Image (cartoon, grey):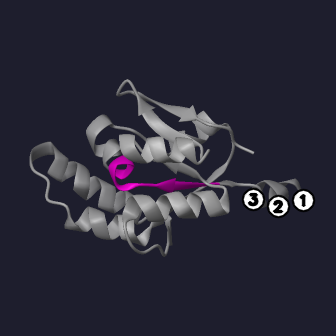
């Protein structure tokens, strides 16, 4: 019974494109999000984030980060979102009470204004949380 309650009580965390690139750049484990939010989470990746990731041209070590990001993305559930990536993430997160994992300054600012919690990389080595989780 307790296991069912916990399984159904997970917080949904949406990863954006630049957050998916962090493991390759900083040797970050996506699963460490749970340590920061102190709750079990269900990590999801929008389909338009995957499309954006495949489309962007990167060079050098960032090219490796992109390949790592694509491999990591295969592990997580996808949600169908269309249109501009940042706007669709913001709307979905607001409407579904999700957390967003991003390091995009503009998106973080918009999420703050909408009172959506954000997980982000602090000082290049650890994750931080901004906002309140219900």
Extreme-front residue of the structure: 113
The picture places residue 127, in percent across and down from the top left corner, at 48, 32
Q: Is 101 within the magenta?
A: no
Q: Marks 3/1: CA distance?
A: 10 Å
**Left or right position of 31 against 115:** left
Q: Marks 1/2: CA distance?
A: 5 Å
Residue in front for this viewpoint, 44 or 102: 102
- Marks 2/3 in contact by CB < 8 Å: the verdict is yes
Residue pictured at 54% horizontal, 41% vertical: 112
**Label 2, residues with CA under 10 Å away: few <14, some 14-19, many ≥20:** few
The residue under label 1 is 1
Residue in front for this viewpoint, 8 or 122: 122
Considering only order in the chain, which callout, 1 or 3, is on the residue closer to the N terminus? Answer: 1
**Left or right position of 48 against 96:** left
**Label 1, residues with CA under 10 Å away: few <14, some 14-19, many ≥20:** few
The picture places residue 83, in percent across and down from the top left corner, at 39, 72
Residue in front for this viewpoint, 23 or 102: 102
- Marks 1/2 in contact by CB < 8 Å: the verdict is yes
Residue pictured at 42% horizontal, 48% vertical: 107
Nearer the observer: mark 3 or 1; the answer is 3
- Which label belongs to residue 44? none
The kind of secondary structure element at disc 1 is: loop
The picture places residue 12, in percent across and down from the top left corner, at 62, 56
The residue under label 3 is 7
- Marks 3/1 in contact by CB < 8 Å: the verdict is no
Q: Is 13 within the magenta?
A: yes
| Image quadrant where one finds the C terminus | top right
Q: What span is colored magenta in the figure?
A: 12-20
- Which label belongs to residue 4? 2
Q: Marks 2/3: CA distance?
A: 5 Å
């Amino acid at each position: 019974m307790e296991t069912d309650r916990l399984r159904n009580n997970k917080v949904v965390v949406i990863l954006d494109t630049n957050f998916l690139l962090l493991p390759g750049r900083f040797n970050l484990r996506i699963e460490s999000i749970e340590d920061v939010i102190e709750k079990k989470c269900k990590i999801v990746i929008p389909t338009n984030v995957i499309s954006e990731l495949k489309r962007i041209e990167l060079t050098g070590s960032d090219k490796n980060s992109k390949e790592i990001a694509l491999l990591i993305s295969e592990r997580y559930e996808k949600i169908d979102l269309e249109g501009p990536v940042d706007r669709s993430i913001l709307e979905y997160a607001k409407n579904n009470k999700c957390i967003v994992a991003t390091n995009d300054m503009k998106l973080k600012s918009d999420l703050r204004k909408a009172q959506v919690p954000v997980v982000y990389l602090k000082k290049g080595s650890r994750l931080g949380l901004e906002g309140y989780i219900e």
